[in-house]
Image (tube, rainbow, N blue to C red):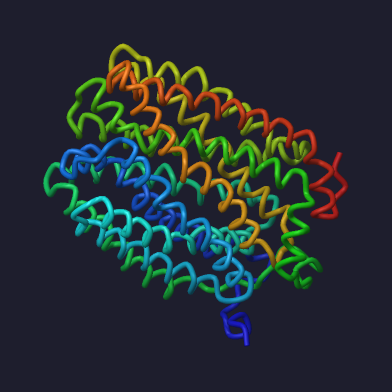
Amino acid sequence: MTAEKNAPTAPAPEQSASRYSYFVLGLLTLVYTFNFIDRQIIAILSPAIKEDLGLSDSVLGLLKGLAFAVLYTTLGIPIAWAADRWNRVNIVAVSLGLWSAFTALSGLAMNATQLMLARLGVGIGEAGGSPPAHSLISDYFPKEKRASALAIYSLGIPFGQMFAFLAGGWVLSQYGWRGTFFIVGVPGVLLAILLKLAVKEPIRGVHDGAAAAVKVGFKQGLAHLLSIPTYWGVTIAVTFASFTGYGTAMWIVDFYRRTYELGYLEITVPLGILNGVVYGIGTWAGGWLTDRFGKNDKGAYAWLPGLGMLLTIPVGWATIWAPAPFWAFFWSAPFLIGLGFYLGPSFSLVQTLAPVRFRAVATAFFFFILNLIALGFGPLWVGALSDIFAASYGDVTGLRLALTTLGGSSLLAAIAFFWTARKLPADWAKATGESVS
């Protein structure tokens, strides 16, 4: 017997954008915030860990990226398969408790191997976070509002980074990197209990009419997804965009520390404000503008993110090669706005193109590709190139040159988004049954 038969139901379709829907969205956004706090915190602690454990940039890049991503990506698909059949709220709550506990346990690591094992545990927990959450949100909001709703959910990324920078920098200065892992991890366990008690499992496909009744097998659903050109297009585009994002985010504290020799709070406070405010504005604006322009032009779900990624190239280089920290922080603002544009539209697009009863797996497969490549190898790419360039140019210029190469992944992301925009109206019409011009 599936849990759906026993689960509480969501309000009827006409009531589904009620206060409770937004309450659920807010709570899931808070969960996603903890997701990124626990994912990002190692980047803030990176210089202290490097100094204490004597690690190279390549090993740090492995710990920040691939050690986390390998199980995060591979387990995401079977967990999502379960989420398309069973109670999604339970899956998210258990996952949150698990990754929070392993974040706390990271503070016990005495060497790189032990820290890698803890990061693997964080990855196992976070594998059950976003795919079921995306599916839940899609059943609380109709497709015309999903870009905005998923953009709000995506605010967990900038908010998580903001709190990681602000709280992480202060806690690090007071309790060291080990104590920071403990303090950051424990609250997530309490939030998992609140989520379980407060959120109802909604009716699956409540906004999708007859399509909601169609049951899809794993092989059938995956074959269907892979036959949609724009599903591939948005997946490739977001992979390259995330490669830029993770490659930058996981090394930005090291960059300011080495290049300008700033103290931790001099780095984390402005970065926290920039991520929470500016990156948040870019993330929200991407969803809002897409819902507005997307009413008449479905290609907006891709060309707007493409414009955002083009913006990141010149302002990203201006940040990396800024002569003073003020200008580096200054140019970070438009970089973060452009980087935030793709989140809501891309996540919404995946949910709309996928069969109703295959949405969690569609998101998990999407995350499998982008996180294995972007999160797994983005930080490692920067770290390895930094070691290579440092042999000839020194540690400061070596890291700058490594970060500069991320302009290439931004360009590839923009190209993939613009290609997707051209193909999207036809695929949207097939997925929704709408007549799209």
Which quadrant is home to the N terminus? Answer: bottom right
Q: Quadrant of residue 136?
A: bottom right
On screen, residue 62 versus residue 224, left or right, reads left
Which of the two residues, 257 or 330, is positioned nearer the viewer here? 257
Image location of residue 205, percent across then percent down? 70, 67
Image location of residue 301, percent across then percent down? 68, 39
- Which residue of the protein is positioned furthest toward the bottom in this rendering? 1
Image location of residue 21, percent across then percent down? 55, 62
Asked if residue 222 is positioned above or below residue 415 in the image, the reply reads: below
Q: Quadrant of residue 206?
A: bottom right
Which quadrant is home to the C terminus? Answer: top right
| Residue at horizontal 56 percent and vertical 46 percent from the top | 370
Counting labels gives 0
- Which residue of the protein is positioned furthest toward the top in this rendering? 323
Which of the two residues, 30 or 343, is positioned nearer the viewer here? 343
Asked if residue 97 is positioned above or below residue 232 in the image, the reply reads: below
On screen, residue 16 versus residue 157, left or right, reads right
| Residue at horizontal 52 percent and vertical 48 percent from the top | 372
On screen, residue 285 versus residue 167, left or right, reads right
| Residue at horizontal 66 percent and vertical 70 percent from the top | 204
On screen, residue 4 versus residue 23, left or right, reads right
| Residue at horizontal 62 percent and vertical 29 percent from the top | 412
Image location of residue 262, percent across then percent down? 20, 25
- Which residue of the protein is positioned furthest toward the left in this rendering? 174
Which of the two residues, 125 or 402, is positioned nearer the viewer here? 402
